[in-house]
Image (tube, rainbow, N blue to C red):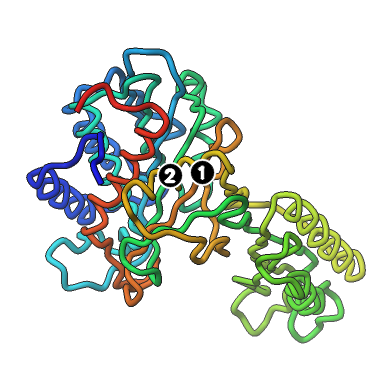
Amino acid sequence: MTHHFPRLRNSDITELTDWRRDLHRYPEISGQESATAARVEGVLRATGPDRIVTNLGGHGVAAVYDGAEAGPRVLLRCELDALPIEERSDASHRSTVPGRGHLCGHDGHMTMIAAMARLLGRVRPARGSVVLMFQPAEEDGSGAARVVADPDFTELRPDYAFAIHNMPGMPLGEVALAEGPSACASRGMRVRLTGKTAHASQPETGLSPMSALARLMPALTALGQGHPLSDPDFALATVTHARLGEPAFGIAPGAADLFVTLRSLTDRRMARLVSEAETLVRQAARVAGLTPEISYEDIFTTTASDPEAVAIATRALDRLGLPHGHGPLPMRPSEDFGRFGETSALAFLLLGAGEDHPALHNPDYDFPDDLIPRGAAIFTAIVDEILGFASV
């Protein structure tokens, strides 16, 4: 099949692979991606975009490539941040930063978008514009929300948005996409229960949160039982951390901390889950005479793919002759790309990293370089479906 859109050269693939591995050596975690953003900006400027916007929602960088005629705006998104995990690898390009690693493949996602910058630098879209978005702080759920809220994003708001995430466990190069929820909503619920300390020999003179904490852990966990992931009522509550008092033998505890990850397929179900969880906490605190404090971190909304955007991506995959299906979608993990759905029709695609490839966030994970040209081809075909290219 003949494709009337630009392609990477062999030299591009070699240079982009080297760049990906260099990114891998110097990972930066959410909110600290300044050096990574500077590397990205340098690569983008070399391709001659019509404009570059920096410091979006933190360290975000966006490059815009305009067509000659008016038309839709298409955003292609990747992530800048790495993880606070120690990498265990013998690769020559392994992380040089202790306790930090690109163990989710964001270095590879950046490289696929950098490949698009090369192609768009040579051949502009026929109409409309393409925005290449290098988004900060995906891993803690704060980045996309800050980007969308940034006043500088107003002029970049897309009509369509697309993102690709590599997925170990799927055959190499196979694609998964589906209409509706693709990744779950989730949030970290932090609970503080405050009573009063006492001498360990006279616990009755204090107010211990021990019994409330012991009741809350199974009660909160029970909120998420009974519905499969395919059910819109799916919910999951996972206790991830608990702390009671101080590590001492002479003090009866006066405070407790509990971390719970709340997860749901839809944002509507998340609102109910939050209400249910907060009710349990306040009831337990009231019975025990404790003061409760509740706060939230790592807030992700549902990532739901729009039918029109999915249809566009499906046509692009068919043109490329790439195998595709629903795969593991929807998936339990969260992805903050869903925030861009507030302003656009979006589609979230999974790209197989190999059935036996180490899982995401594993200490021995590394992005498969073979996916760089594959991902770039998918993005290019999507752009061609919506905007076309000026000439090839």
Amino acid marked by disc 1: Ala
User: Going 39% across and 66% down the picture, which residue do you hit?
Assistant: 360
Query: Which residue is nearer to you in this view: 299 or 113?
Result: 113
Q: Looking at the image, is 35 positioned above or below residue 24?
A: above
Spot occupied by residue 264 in the image (x, y as percentages of width and height):
68, 60
**Residue 209 shows in the view:** no
* Residue 76 shown left or right of residue 246 in the figure: left
Q: Residue furthest left?
A: 11
* Disc 1 secondary structure class: helix
Query: Which residue is nearer to you in this view: 334 or 34?
Result: 334
Q: Residue furthest front?
A: 1
Callout 1 environment at 10 Å: few (<14), some (14 to 19), or many (20+)?
Answer: some
Label annotation for residue 315: 2
User: Going 34% across and 27% down the picture, which residue do you hit?
Assistant: 388
Callout 2 environment at 10 Å: few (<14), some (14 to 19), or many (20+)?
Answer: some
**Residue 155 shows in the view:** yes
* Residue 21 shown left or right of residue 152 in the figure: left
**Circle 1 is placed at which residue position?**
311
Spot occupied by residue 33 in the image (x, y as percentages of width and height):
34, 43
Amino acid marked by disc 2: Arg
The C terminus lies in quadrant: top left
Spot occupied by residue 34 in the image (x, y as percentages of width and height):
31, 39
Spot occupied by residue 182 in the image (x, y as percentages of width and height):
56, 55
User: Going 57% across and 61% down the picture, which residue do you hit?
Assistant: 330
Label annotation for residue 171: none
* Residue 117, image quadrant: top left
* Residue 177 shown left or right of residue 231 in the figure: left
User: Going 45% across and 48% down the picture, which residue do you hit?
Assistant: 314
Q: Looking at the image, is 71 positioned above or below residue 247?
A: above
Q: Distance of mark 2 from mark 1, alpha carbons?
A: 6 Å
Q: Is mark 2 in CB contact (under 8 Å) with mark 1?
A: yes
Q: Residue furthest right?
A: 287
